Amino acid sequence: MTSYNRRSVLKASAAFAGASALGLPGIVRAQTSTIKIGHLTPLTGFLGALGAYAQLGLRMAEEEINAAGGVMGRQIAVTSEDCVNPATAATKAQRMLDQDGVAVLMGEINSASALTIMQVAERNKRLFMQIGARSDALRGKNCNRYTFHVDIPSTVMVNAVGQALVRDNMVKGKKIYSLTADYLFGHDLSKAAKKFFAANGGNQAGDELIATDVTDFSPYLLKIRQAKLDLVATNLAGNQVTNFVKQYAEFGLPYPVAGFNLNTADAWAAGEGNLSGIWPTVWHHELQTPGSKAFVAEFMKRYGKPPENHAWIEYVSLKMLAQAMNETKSTDTDKLIAYFESEAQFDILKARKGYFRSWDHQLMQEAYPFTVKAKGQARDKWDFLKFGDAVPAANQPLDLLAPTKAESACKM
């Protein structure tokens, strides 16, 4: 039988008490510490206006989640920074992981910057919720298991508008001239558009590459004026679109316009009377679902203007991440990946819930084509857009317009 003297017991008790005094507060702090999330989005440059809306939507979601008790009883803290180019995006993403101690990376709109953040996420084996970049290549040849994509990809945008063009006999046998943003997303969009036109009997008359800092479109508009066309298609991005449609209206050109990328902020900036044609979007503030109406009302109350689609998508993305953390009771990357890959359903404020496909990590969801109301019908400066029914239709699978697994180059 082992014996203990009184002095040994007292020493042991004192040592335990000291360790407890030092250790227990540390344990409590670990259980109640904030969950840090790193957010990157362009706040300057040709996508800066979209990034400003993205930040507003994310902050609103962060405040609502924390007011409701946080995630797993812990508050979340989002660090948001401007990423002006791909190199900066990668550097800031790495610093957020190394120095700021973030659990997850979120954000981006620029496809080239999103690609560099994806590489950082894969290298560090950390989750990246890629929210606003639309390039097919990100979900295709450049996919990785650590990245999930929220916005609709280029192919879906082209197919959403393309269905309407085919319906209105604007493709088969028609002469089509395109303008394309000269960076990753624009190139992807052009590739998808050319494929669609070829498959439906359209004739591609030309495709001009436009640098992202171009503001004067008159040289291209003069070419369009001199050509005999049936349709002008744009694969532009950010304020390129705003500048183009304003100048197109000033030139008074007769050809109809089909745009394969337009965010509502850019449409609003173009203004009533300048925008024409048919375009795609992932969400709009006039959706009549209970969730969308409540979100729009609160956003209007806070900021005095309706939310643009990047505000909505950042808002629902943080809510989806919070759901995943609460359901898994963890911020562990592998557990979060497994949850998203289970094709769990998420309320994204639309008529149908969304889910991430397990094999390419793309969120499956509805999209919407839109045109422009007749002049004089707008109730206010945000009201001149006329939205069509959701695509795919309610009786069709959500992945109908997306690239299939056989068509995709994604191999994880």
Image (cartoon, rainbow, N blue to C red):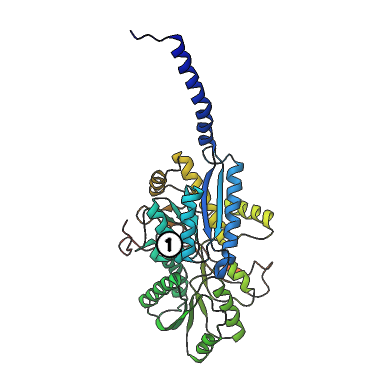
- x then y, percent, for residue 296: 62, 55
What is the quadrant of the C terminus in the image?
bottom left
- 212 or 360, nearer to the observer: 212
- Does residue 272 lie above or below 100 as drawn? below
Which amino acid, mark 1? Thr
Residue 397 visible at all? no
Q: Is residue 121 left or right of residue 244?
A: left
* Label 1 secondary element: helix
The picture places residue 379, in percent across and down from the top left corner, at: 69, 67
| Residue toward you, 81 or 205 | 81
Q: Is residue 380 left or right of residue 172?
A: right
Q: Nearer the viewer, residue 225 or 332?
A: 332
Relative horizontal placement of residue 377, taking residue 343 as reference (left or right): right
Q: Quadrant of the N terminus?
A: top left
Q: Which quadrant of the figure has residue 409?
A: bottom left
Q: Residue furthest front?
A: 7
Question: Left or right: 406 with respect to 399?
Answer: left
Q: Can the viewer see residue 276? A: yes
Residue bearing mark 1: 116
